[in-house]
Image (cartoon, grey):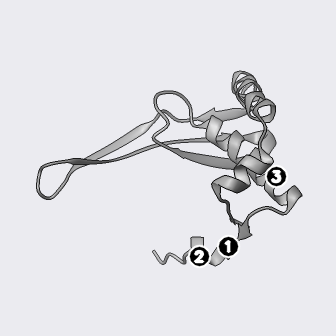
Amino acid sequence: MPLLLRNQDLSEILSMDSVMQVPGTTFKELYHGEAVTAPRADILSPSPNGQAIHGLKSMSGVILSLRGHGWGHDGGPGYGIQFTAMAKLIYDLAKERGVGRELPLEWFQQNVNS
C-alpha cells in the first residue's frame, strides 16, 4: 500500500546511521549480481515559448533481496538502486512506527487495453 509521508514523518523515523548503511549494502549487492540498475535517462523538451527547457531525469533499479523496485528523479550521474534501497528502508520504518497515511492502491493503477 503506498504511503504519503511528510518531512516531519521522515525526521521522526530516520537516523543518520540507518541512512548511511544503505549505500554500502546496496552496492555490495550490485557487485554480487543481486541487483540491477540502468543508467540515468534524460528527456528534455523546450517550453512552448522557447524560454526554458523541461526535463525529466530518471534512474531505476531492482534489488532482489528487497523484493521491490525503485525509481528516482534527477539523482545525478550514478545508479538508480540507491533510491530503491532508501525507499524500502523508509517504507519499512514508517509501517513499523505507524507513520504516514496509506493511499488507495487503485489511485496508482489502471487497466490498459491493447
Q: Which residue is mark 2?
A: 107
Q: Callout 1: helix, strand or loop?
A: loop
Q: Would residue 17 be found to the left or right of residue 114 on screen?
A: right
Marks 1 and 2: in contact by CB < 8 Å? yes
Q: Would residue 32 be found to the left or right of residue 96 on screen?
A: left
Which residue is depicted at the point 69% across and 47% down?
87
Q: Which residue is mark 3?
A: 92
Mark 2 or 1, which is nearer the eye? 1
Q: Which residue is mark 1?
A: 103
**Residue nearer the viewer, 113 or 75:** 75
Marks 1 and 3: in contact by CB < 8 Å? no
Answer whether residue 67 is visible to the viewer in this image: no
Q: Callout 2: helix, strand or loop?
A: helix
Q: Amino acid at mark 2?
A: Trp
10 Å neighbourhood of mark 2: few (<14), some, or many (≥20)?
A: few
Instruction: Give the mark nearest the N terminus, 3 or 1.
Output: 3
Residue 92 drawn at (x, y percent) = 82, 52
Instruction: Give the mark nearest the N terminus, 3 or 2.
Output: 3
Which residue is depicted at the point 45% across and 40% down?
74
10 Å neighbourhood of mark 3: few (<14), some, or many (≥20)?
A: few
Q: Is residue 53 above or below residue 113?
A: above
Which numbered marker is on residue 64?
none
In 3D space, how far apart are the residues under numbered discs 3 and 2 (Cα atoms)?
A: 21 Å
Q: Is residue 35 above or below residue 60?
A: above
Quadrant of residue 41 within the rendered picture: top left
10 Å neighbourhood of mark 1: few (<14), some, or many (≥20)?
A: few
In 3D space, how far apart are the residues under numbered discs 2 and 1 (Cα atoms)?
A: 8 Å
Residue 54 drawn at (x, y percent) = 28, 50
Q: Amino acid at mark 3?
A: Asp
Q: Quadrant of the C terminus?
A: bottom left
Marks 2 and 3: in contact by CB < 8 Å? no
